[in-house]
Amino acid sequence: MAEALVGGAVLSAFLQVAFDRVASREVLDFLKGRKNIDRMVQKLKIELMSADAVLIDAEEKQITNPAVKEWLDELKDAVYVADDLLDEIAYEALRCKLEAESTSKVRGLISTFVSSFDKSIQSELKNILDRLEFISKQKDVLRLEKVAAVGTPSRPLTTSCPEEYGVFGRDKDKEAIFMKFQSSDASVNGICVVPIVGMGGVGKTTLARLIYNDKRVTDSFDHKAWVCVSEIFDCFRLLKSILEDATLSMCDIQNMNLLQIKIRETFKEKKIFLVLDDVWNEKYNDWVELLKVFKCGAQEIKIIVTTRSKKVASNVCTVPDYLLNQLSNEECWLLFEKHAFRNGSSGEFPLLREIGKQIVQKCGGLPLAAKTLGGLLHFEEDPREWTKILKSDIWDLTEGNTSILPALRLSYHFLPPHLKRCFSYCSILPKDYEFKKEELVKLWMAEDLLQQSKGNRRIEEIGEEYFDDLASRLFFQRSSNNESCFIMHDLVNDLAKFISREFCFKLEMTDESCIITRKTRHFSYVRTEFDAFKKFNVSYEAKGLRTFLGFDLSPPECMWNNISTIMIDDLLLKFKCLRVLSFSTYRNMKELPKSVGNLKHLRYLNLSHTSIERLPNSLCTLYNLQTLLLSECWSLTKLPTKMWRLVNLRHLDIVNTNLEEMPLHMGKLRNLQILTTFVVSKHNRSNIKELGELLHLSGALSILNLQNVQHARDAMEVNLKDKQHLYELVLEWGHDKDSSENEINVLEHLCPHSKLEFLTIENYGGTRFPKWLQDCSFSNMVYIRLANCKYCYSWPPLGDLPNLKKLFVEGFHVVSHVDREFYGGGSSAVKPFRSLEILSFKDMPEWQEWFLFEGKDEDEGGVFYNLQKLCIIKCPKLSRGLPNHLPALMTLKIKDCPQLVASVPRSPNLSELQLSNCDGLLLKELPPRLLQLEVGEGHILQSFVELMMSIPGGGLPTTLKTLLIQGTFLLPRRHYYPSLEELEIKGGFDSLWCFPLEFYSKLKSFSVFGSESLESLSVSEGPHRDLISLTSLNIFDCPKFVSFPNGGLCAPNLTEIYIFGCEKLKSLPEGMCTLLPSLESLELNKCPELQSFPTGGLPSSLVTLDIAECDKLFSRRMEWGLQGLHSLKQFKIWFVIEEVESFPVEAWLPPTLTEFTIFRFSNLKSLNSMGFQHLTSLQRLEIKSCHGLRYLTEERLPASLSFLILEECPLLKQRCQRDKGKDWPKISHIPFIQIEDEVIT
């Protein structure tokens, strides 16, 4: 918002948004009779507009004049303050409108409050006016003037001359471009245009040069020309340059018509190759005009266009554009080495080479960065200078010495003002953070960065357009890990940080260059498991903070974070201007303080994945709130009763909460765009009708507890058919009872629009499905799930849906046959389920037969021709009907179908097979491309074993990587399985007491669960003795297991061992310290007979050690030799019954330890100070379930501690009470202290 005012070349959209807000009906009514406030608001407008007049000049001069830069920052800060005041006035106007009551008592209270507000706002307006007047006067001192437009930064023109130092890592890209030229449909009207798209500095021009100078181009074309287009797209200049370069002669023609004639004469019946480098112009018509000239009778014209914009590429291309990616680190190093070292080789400088490799990591694969930083260090042999570059931010390097900054800043320079402020805000995103489009759009919306359309377009659509525009200019790139997410390149992220300066602060523990100031408005950080009060002390300088946002670098469901409750209270009290606030994934957060109601500017509140049990009623006074995220708040059962007051609410996410019902009057939230869930009330049974009043719902909607709809006509009023922007619908009943006609009618009336893509119907009690589900007009439907519809005796004709890709059917308890009706009643020419990729049947106890649709062209592709995954689970009576010809099938799961008589379907692509309790299934051979096989109990397991024994070598495909076996079986002896990488066995081996590891030479992971017969592991002498591939070994609940191979396990790459419930095990593998040099994690649990570690002790590589219920081993703990484990960082010891009253003893643990957990020491009374005094690296101490522990150490716990967690230690709770407890002085220095589930720091 304010960024646009400073960075843009026209009147800031921020001002327009702010003034539109003040010009609203509510505000105008509010200002009537308040002449002083009205006069001051008008004066504020004039001051801001006066400053805006010179902003273009200031924007230019700030680059070289620090005083102008400081003036801009002061102005920007003042604009933020002014905007907050205007927003406060708008809020107050809206509050008065919504809260005005008819009783005189309430009117009196409002009158008193308004009078107080008037005095306060006048005082604040006066202060900001004085400040703006002072800032405005400074513009004359700085000689800032009103100018028409921002000048374009000067840039050197590119040429076709080959790279002096060579090109690295672009051979594949070059060949890919030539392949595009040679494709049969590459040309349109004899012209082929291949755009090379990439971010600034990625090497587009270099690749174009490489192709331009390739011998194939020189030999194949009569004329070739190179033109640097740059930002000014002058058609006459371009054509003249092309002619001069192609003919290698000057042209003095000054007339466009004569020039076109000359080009046509020159190019007629010739082969032409052109490079148009660095194109910025996105106007389609300009390109069409240029291209007209080349329709000149030339035999062939090939054109390469390089650009940073996908929009340019889409305008010019005749084939799909070529997206040029970054170089690998190794390729980047070769380029850097060439430029940094005297003879292009680092061989004589091993120390510089090591530093240089780290510098290259900073380049993020950008050749320009590698070349520039290499050039800065050219001939420099002092390691200290190299280290300076390594530790410097690239943006801190002198601009005169590096072209990285201007190259990337140019992309920013050409952004329109509204995109500049959106991009600048992105500086709060952590590096490598994967974000979704809708996530960022909600944040932009909350910060008023989106210009409201004068038409009927939703603000979210405008935000999506902004996002797509930035993505098309490659400020955002698709994540390679998740197709639905985006990332920012590290240097682009640095660019955003450079531009936003002190107004955005990203808390990074490794970065001390950022300083938070009073100007800071946006604050972000990466959440950690424990976020304490002291972590955020730096943020309290910024009183006008608008954004307080934590990010998770892992999926939220994987995070279990905690935050100080003091921190929450303090934050809500100190930062009154917050617009964006997130406490997501803080699992210890159970309530939101009432003081949240003071955040009158708040527009975005994220409490998802917390343990929130209730929301305060004061939340309903947040009249500006647009987004409320409560997903995965499992403890939340009710929403505040006055939710209807949140008149600006647009997004309410309550997925996977336990709401019992919706509050009354939800229909008044007319601006709602996203309502993920609507829970029909048991007490107010007609409240489903309120959904009908929410006309703009989009995205996904789940309607739950439909059994509470008493009258089917109420369902009709939901009017789903008119909610055209919904793409996903879940209809769920919350009970299991006999069929009722009312449920049939309710479902009939909940007919969605025909564009729906995802549909789930669950716990439906009707006997038949509605007519609308039998309608093949749902042509966009890609996903259907029908679950627990126990009384339905048939299915709708789903085979007619042309785009259905995923179908899940489960819990149909009366269906006995799947017949023709299932495939639909379409013409014989149309194949049923022609797009289906996943089909799953589950829990169908009466299903007996599956009628197979026989098409005429079965061999060419009949029904289920595209099916990739088939699951049939818990269908005990199914006896026949398994499809046999599934050419695309990749995954097959058949479990608990004991009567099914069939063969495994033929499929050349079958790679995953899971079979269990399906005795009638014939397993004649294993698919040739099988990667993963799971075989469960029953006759099928015996068939599998017989198959293995009947074929030499074990009968397993050479492609098989993973094998999971469940049940008792006889393992074939003397068979080698060289391809297996993962082997998991659940259950016993029939008569096999010793497992031969030598037969599995490529095995990476070996796990055994619950084997009653396994006694030992063996490794034969000879070439197979070394288990060089093994990385993980797990033995669970094997009561007879007693030993490892004689002489130990020679597994040089083994990193983890987990042994649980091996009651007879007495010793670990011999020679662990030398034979297991890579072991990092060792867990020993419930091994009561284990007596000691092997001679020589544990490997020095050990990082994590976890020991529980190993009493004999614990009794000899002084022999463990932990002091010698110099890599040990995490140590957990638990379930100790020995009479230990003080723990640990002095110098028992290594000083490298960072995490220490003591759990269930039944007789422990105190911690031994001497055992902790040398633990100078200890960061985390957990003490749990030590009920007799009376006090902590006599001395202060180590100064290095950051986290102290005490659970189920009742005698310590009072002693460690904040500021009052006797042990508080010993722990007060620790940033994060949690007692039970309460964070007290």
Image: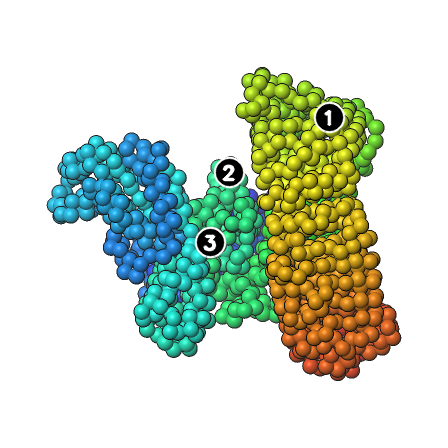
Q: Earlier in the sequence, mark 2 or mark 3?
A: 3
| Label 3 residue SS | helix
Could you give the CA–CA distance between mark 2 and mark 3, rounded to whole angstroms?
22 Å
Q: Is residue 240 above or below residue 81?
A: above
Q: Which mark is residue 423?
A: 3
Q: Which residue is mark 1?
A: 880
Could you give the CA–CA distance between mark 1 and mark 3, rounded to whole angstroms?
60 Å
User: What amino acid is found at the position of numbered circle 2 in the picture?
Assistant: Arg
Name which residue lies at 80% across and 70% down: 1091
Nearer to us: label 2 or label 1? 1
| Label 2 residue SS | loop
Residue 185: % across, % down: 36, 33
Name which residue lies at 53% across and 40% down: 458
Q: Which residue is mark 2?
A: 457
Q: Earlier in the sequence, mark 2 or mark 1?
A: 2
Q: Is residue 465 above or below residue 1236?
A: above
User: What amino acid is found at the position of numbered circle 3 in the picture?
Assistant: Phe
Q: Earlier in the sequence, mark 1 or mark 3?
A: 3
Res. 46 image quadrant:
bottom left
